[in-house]
Amino acid sequence: MIARLFAQERAARETLERADELKSQFVELAAHELRSPVGAIYGLSETIVERGDRLSPERLEELQRSLTTQIRRLRELVEQLLDLSRLDAEAVVIRPQRVRVRDRLEEIVGSVLPLESMQIGLEVDAMLEAELDVDALDRIVSNLIVNACRYGEPPVLVSAAEEHGTLRVTVQDRGPGVPVEFVPRLFDRFARDAASAASLGTGLGLAIARSYARAHSGEVSYRPAAPPRRCVRADPAGSRGGLVRRNGTV
């Protein structure tokens, strides 16, 4: 009896300690990552307000475009930080339902297109159905598509098929690939190779995709493909969840 009470007390203490650690990590992460876009937005806004009437139309338009880009970056970062906070707190609830896969993927592609200018194709049987959580599918596939658009080369192709009772969603492009030495860190938070370091991306998209896949009883992984291409495979299948694989040169 005493041993059981001691074990319960220790488990409760460990839970509280983990919650406190996650809170501290989130606050530190948010403060560090939000500083750059917030500073840029403040500076651009001040310039437009104080000097806008003295700037040429071309310069003013350039500043406004930069402001829009930074606001979009801030919105993306806030959404990703909220995703990570829910995932770290294990507050994501997976609710599988029967869906038409093509319909869901069309919606995901449509939501990405206003933000990305790259052509995105879709190859999915209109009658294909699967049991999956639509929100998890959205967070997984949209992050992988955005990553392919930003770091790959056109065309981007999204396809899906059922293999041995598992739904496999593939996102691929014709990019040059990821350096071999970077592959082990590809899905880490804020991980960027030299080629992507200059991008406005946060380095969180792939980490979020993997976390949602794991919440859906799946995984995210990478393997080279031939001929060279960037390829993402998501396998959210049936009630048992799924697996997401990056096959190619993400």
Image: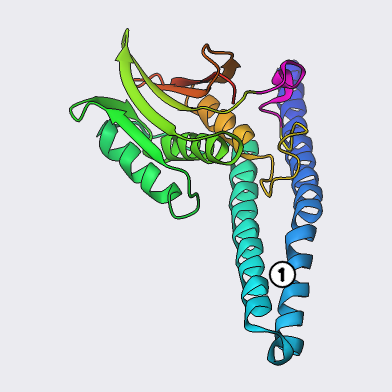
Q: Identify the residue under disc 1.
A: 41
Front one among 209 and 62: 62
Q: Secondary structure at mark 1?
A: helix
Q: Position of residue 192 (x, y in %)?
A: 74, 34
Q: Is 173 left, or right, of 51 in this rendering?
A: left
Q: Position of residue 120 (x, y in %)?
A: 40, 39
Q: Tell me what residue is drawn at x 58 percent, y 13 percent.
A: 223
Residues packed near mark 1 inside 10 Å, few (<14), some (14 to 19) or many (20 plus)? some
Front one among 226 and 108: 226
Q: Tell me what residue is drawn at x 70 percent, y 87 percent.
A: 52
The stretch in magenta equals 178-188
Let me know if residue 186 is in the magenta part: yes
Q: Position of residue 7 (x, y in %)?
A: 74, 21
Q: Is 144 left, or right, of 85 in this rendering?
A: left
Q: Tell me what residue is drawn at x 55 percent, y 17 percent.
A: 228
Let me know if residue 246 is in the magenta part: no
For residue 131, above or below residue 61? above
Q: Position of residue 139 (x, y in %)?
A: 49, 39
User: Looking at the rendering, in which quadrant would you find the N terminus?
Assistant: top right
Tally the numbered discs.
1
Q: Is 120 left, or right, of 186 in this rendering?
A: left
- Residue 141 visible in rendering: yes
Q: Is 80 left, or right, of 50 in this rendering?
A: left
Front one among 68 and 202: 68
- Residue type marked 1: Ile
Q: Tell me what residue is drawn at x 63 percent, y 23 percent.
A: 177
